[in-house]
Amino acid sequence: MRFLTPLIALVALSACGGGDATGNATTATPVAGVAAPAGKPWTETVAVTPEGGYRIGNPDAAIKLVEYGSRTCPTCGAFAREGNEPLIANYVSTGKVSFEFRDFAVHGAPDLAAAVLGRCNGTATFFPLLEAMYQDQLATLDRMQAIPQAEQARLQSIPPVQAIAGWADAAGFVDFVKQRGVPEAKARECLRDQKLIDQVVKITEEGGATVTGTPTFLINGEKVENAVQWKDIEAALKGAGA
């Protein structure tokens, strides 16, 4: 399939995790909060961006935080378990900050499987499923580690769409989303949906020039250098005026 070779090339250049966390040392004028439309708080305002990510919060927020993340990356999981709740509650809710998550398939087929299933129900469940996957990540990684070497080799040798579906079963992703509102038939249909697969591949391909490890964060288009922990991202948001 057309995406397999470039995706492998990008994955070879990328890694899960990063270096020493230093963040950006800029300070901006404080940004004023923005009231959400009546009846729909910013924490329930979710949309797909032109870049293919999913954004929660004020679409016109003065501070736009973007994360390139992998759902099977332990460093991304650690950030999410510590930082997602205060990020949404303390910053996105004010209308000052929007948060966009872009799935970056650093681990190839396993990441594509998780990302496609995370998109299967669209905007309504994207962020709840993302949060649930990160909360369950340690158990998921244990399941993946337990997959016999022969089965891993088989999954690497079959056509890409079959490999994505195979990893979805082997890692328990199908059962996981089935328990959270995605019927199994719909989940399997999504895993065969070339359009959904291509969305994640496109993000991975286009992010390759910027992303050298996951998670990678951008604030208003500028990379937050070597920051993978919530304390560093929070400092960078405050430095931007949040």
Image (tube, helix red, strand yellow):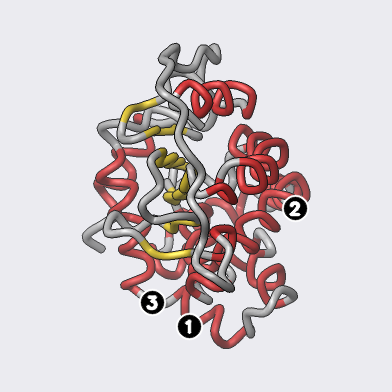
Q: In the shown orientation, is residue 18 left or right of residue 175?
A: left
| Dot placed on the residue nearer the N-terminal end, 3 or 2 | 2
Name the quadrant of the N terminus: bottom left
Q: Residues within 10 Å of mark 2 (few under 14, many from 20)?
A: some
Q: Position of residue 226 (x, y in %)?
A: 47, 18
Residue 167 visible, this orientation? no
Q: Position of residue 34 (x, y in %)?
A: 48, 50
Query: What number is the disc on residue 193?
Result: 3
Q: Position of residue 67 (x, y in %)?
A: 46, 41
Q: Give 225 or 159, whichever is nearer the viewer.
A: 225
Q: Residues within 10 Å of mark 3 (few under 14, many from 20)?
A: some
Three-letter residue code for mark 3: Asp
Name the residue that disc number 2 marks.
136
Q: CA distance from mark 1 to mark 3?
A: 6 Å
Q: CA distance from mark 3 to mark 2?
A: 25 Å
| Dot placed on the residue nearer the N-terminal end, 1 or 2 | 2
How many tags in the picture? 3
Q: Are marks 1 and 3 in contact (CB under 8 Å)?
A: yes
Q: Secondary structure at mark 2?
A: loop
Residue placed at 38% from the left, 64% from the top?
A: 48
Q: Secondary structure at mark 1?
A: helix
Q: Residues within 10 Å of mark 1 (few under 14, many from 20)?
A: few
Pair 3/2: label in front: 2
Residue 86 visible, this orientation? yes
| 56 w.r.t. 228: above or below | below
Q: Give 59 or 10, whichever is nearer the viewer.
A: 59
Name the residue that disc number 1 marks.
189
Q: Position of residue 28 (x, y in %)?
A: 40, 21
Three-letter residue code for mark 1: Glu
